[in-house]
Image: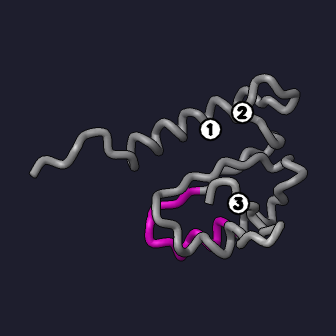
Amino acid sequence: MTGQPIAGRFGFASCIQLAPSVQTPWLGLYGDRDAGIPVDDVEALRAALGAAALPAEIVRYADAEHGFHCDDRPSFHHEAAADAWRRTLEWLDRHVRTEPDSE
């Protein structure tokens, strides 16, 4: 679902439509003050991911804007970025295999 608009545009299916069929564990990190991604869309995505067969999580940051994790942007939000990075690393530790299966 990476790169897909939550609500859909430009002829692409929305993340909301695709959510029930995700094929990998999925983590979404959103700023509530992102002018391009309304909170209502984020919550609709959260609800749609509830039907997914794989783990999925949505995290919202109340004071963060779009690009809150990029320290080269005026929208950089240190606290949200630090929490998002911690959650991302934890998510990867839980859901990405680092050792091959032994047979």
**Which quadrant of the rendered structure holds the N terminus?**
bottom right
Tell which circle, 3 or 1, labels the residue nearer the N-terminal end. 3
Give the x, y percent position of residue 15.
68, 67
Q: Which residue is mark 2?
A: 69
* Crowding near the residue tagged with mark 3, few <14, some 14–19, many ≥20 C-alpha atoms within 10 Å: some
Question: Which disc is residue 4 wearing?
Answer: 3
Tell which circle, 1 or 2, labels the residue nearer the N-terminal end. 2
Q: Amino acid at mark 1?
A: Ala
CA gap, disc 1 and disc 2: 8 Å
The answer to the question of whether label 3 and label 2 lie on touching residues, with beta carbons closer than 8 A, is: no
Residue under the image location 88 percent in, 27 percent down = 74
CA gap, disc 3 and disc 2: 19 Å
Between 3 and 70, the one nearer to me in the picture: 3
Let me know if residue 48 is in the magenta part. Answer: yes
Give the x, y percent position of residue 80.
70, 35
Residue under the image location 64 percent in, 72 percent down = 47
Let me know if residue 60 is in the magenta part. Answer: no
Quarter where residue 72 is shown: top right
CA gap, disc 3 and disc 1: 20 Å
Name of the residue lying farthest toward the top: 72
Q: Amino acid at mark 2?
A: His
* Crowding near the residue tagged with mark 2, few <14, some 14–19, many ≥20 C-alpha atoms within 10 Å: many
Question: Which disc is residue 84 wearing?
Answer: 1
Residue under the image location 76 percent in, 24 percent down = 71
* Of labels 3 and 2, the one closer to you: 3
Name of the residue lying farthest toward the front: 11
Give the x, y percent position of residue 6.
74, 63
Q: Amino acid at mark 3?
A: Gln
Give the x, y percent position of residue 94.
38, 46
The residue stretch that appears in magenta: 45-57
